[in-house]
Amino acid sequence: MEVEDRDELCFPQFPNTSCWKPSPPWPPTVTIMLYSMSLITVVLNLLIIISISHFRKLHTHTNILLLSLAVTDFVVGLMLMPVEVLRKTSCWFLGDYVDGSGSTYTIVATIITSASIGTIVLISVDRYVAICDPLHYTTKVTPKAKKSELKAARKLGVLVLGFLMCFAPYYGVIIAGPQLIIESSATFAVHLYYSNSCLNPVIYAFFYPWFRKAVKQIVTLQILQPGSSE
């Protein structure tokens, strides 16, 4: 093999067994943007996890579901988003056991995304029961609390709508199969689906005053003061 050809190999010291360096399907600026989105996803969802876990007044059954979703989104930002970018732009260095295009990665990604979908389903069921059967939703709901639950239902409806918009292209790729979808479209669908994990905290910031207040206390380190969890 020619010397100049070795520059295109992932492991030029092993020219007979090395794979070729992948050609990124997008400009370098897109790679930077996707890695930045991954970092933002991790930070924002970590703030949600700390907020709901620390403040006792946020320990409602609805917020527990949001906490579960935030944990899943945190893992998506920490693992799936950067690995997906790595698969398309760099040589795979994690070995054959964790092959980026093999079954191990696929299984892990499927488990994580299924957990996210399952949590969204539970949130939808929770809101459906709160709206359609408010008398049996809980035996301790006061009229004022019932009113706030109907308001929460509309806010969480935006959350579910955002998820469906990000998930629809990904679902279409799954249904159509790789033989009918070009690689660039499949890549876009996957990253759009993962971007929902970054969108969810933004929705919380717009619609939930408790989240903005909690973030302020976290950033200013007020949560370290005694009695801050009350």
Image: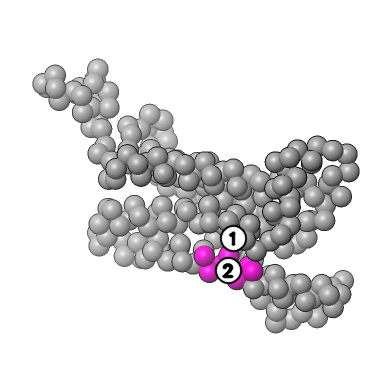
Identify the image quadrant of residue 209. bottom right
Is the residue under label 2 in contact with that under label 1 (CB below 8 Å)?
A: yes
Which secondary structure lies at badge 1?
A: helix
- In percent of width and height, residue 142 lies at 86, 75
State which region is magenta: 155-162
Up the image or down, 183 lies above or below 91; here it is: below
Q: Check the image and tell me how it is coloured.
A: one colour
| Mark 1: few/some/many CA within 10 Å (<14, 14-19, 20+) | some
Q: Which residue is mark 2?
A: 158
Instruction: Please tell me which residue is depicted at 35% across the width and 55% down the height of the picture.
Output: 188
N-terminal label among 1 and 2: 2
Query: Does the magenta run of residues contain 216?
Result: no
The image quadrant where one finds the N terminus is top left
User: Which three-letter amino acid code belongs to the residue tagged 1?
Assistant: Ile
Q: Could you tell me what secondary structure mostly forms the magenta stretch?
A: helix
- In percent of width and height, residue 159 lies at 58, 65
Up the image or down, 179 lies above or below 32; here it is: below
| Mark 2: few/some/many CA within 10 Å (<14, 14-19, 20+) | some
Which secondary structure lies at badge 2?
A: helix
Up the image or down, 68 lies above or below 144; here it is: above
Query: Does the magenta run of residues contain 157?
Result: yes
Residue 13 or 23: which is nearer the viewer?
23
Instruction: Please tell me which residue is depicted at 59% across the width and 43% down the height of the picture.
Output: 43
User: Which three-letter amino acid code belongs to the residue tagged 2?
Assistant: Val
Q: Can residue 204 be seen?
A: yes
Q: Which residue is mark 1?
A: 203
Instruction: Please tell me which residue is depicted at 76% across the width and 72% down the height of the picture.
Output: 148
| Residue occupying the far left of the picture | 2
